[in-house]
Image (cartoon, helix red, strand yellow):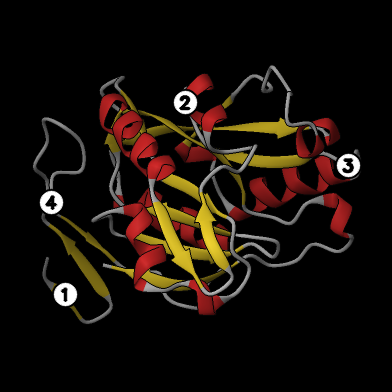
Amino acid sequence: MQQKESGLYIQKPLIEGTNEIHYVEDPIKIGDSAEELLFFILRLNPQIDQISYIISYPELYHENDYLEWPERIWLPVTEVNREILQGLNSLYRRKLETLFICSSVVTRDGDSAHIPMVKLNINNDKYLTDNTKGIIGRQRGAFINAGQNYQFWGFDLMADKEWFRWTESCQNYKSELDNGVYKFNNYQHSERSLDVGFSAHNIYSLPRYGKDIIHEVRNVII
């Protein structure tokens, strides 16, 4: 991949069957918000036509045996902007609900694809070691500090089969951390992701934590 000033030249095929090169202004950087990371990924992948989100309810946070995730709501990329997302977030927070962005997207050709996403059970930059980063394999993307945990969002779209293989490999990965053995078994986004066929991450803080805490990019891998 070539870099030039403030942009990124993307030369890797973005999804199976394509081989496009795109120039992206305003690359993501440490200190940017999760919201800005989402906008960056959309600029980086102009073939995305729709993204999806779910509204999670209090029982989803606490109940390991929650059997059904809420139905996905689809949003055209042309309607994805800061005002819309923050408006939805404010609306749901008043009802103690949270907006979760889903990995699943639809391309302009009508194909199903995924933004790679995983949730890491760590809560400090010091745990972003090479071993921890090994969980995501050879993916380009960014790690977000989401307060109680970290998230990884990949830059390159995955077709369904590739996403299933990658998500399963993330779950099977074990890494030794300073505080013991790392286990990728979070109740919201591990086995459940494969069961329902998508991952879902919040880009704004959960209502139960009071004020809305900014989720911040802490590491970028390109």
Q: Which mark is residue 3?
A: 1
Q: Amino acid at mark 2?
A: Leu
- Could you tell which of marks 4 and 1 lies nearer the N-terminus? 1
**Residue shown at 40%/69% (left/top)?**
28
- Could you tell which of marks 2 and 3 lies nearer the N-terminus? 3
- Residue indicated by mark 2: 194
Residue 186 versus residue 151 in the image, above or below: above
**Residue shown at 28%/53% (left/top)?**
137
Q: Amino acid at mark 3?
A: Leu
Task: Measure how far apart labels 2 and 1 are at the Cα level.
Answer: 35 Å
- Could you tell which of marks 4 and 3 lies nearer the N-terminus? 4
In the rendered image, residue 43, in percent from the top left (x then y), is placed at: 35, 53
Relative side of 75 to 92, left or right? left
Q: Amino acid at mark 1?
A: Gln
In the rendered image, residue 86, in percent from the top left (x then y), is placed at: 71, 52
Q: Which mark is residue 96?
A: 3
Query: Which one is closest to the eye, mark 1 or mark 3?
Result: 3
Task: Measure how far apart labels 1 and 3 are at the Cα level.
Answer: 43 Å
- Residue indicated by mark 4: 12
Relative side of 76 to 187, left or right? left
> The residue tagged with tag 3: helix, strand or loop?
loop
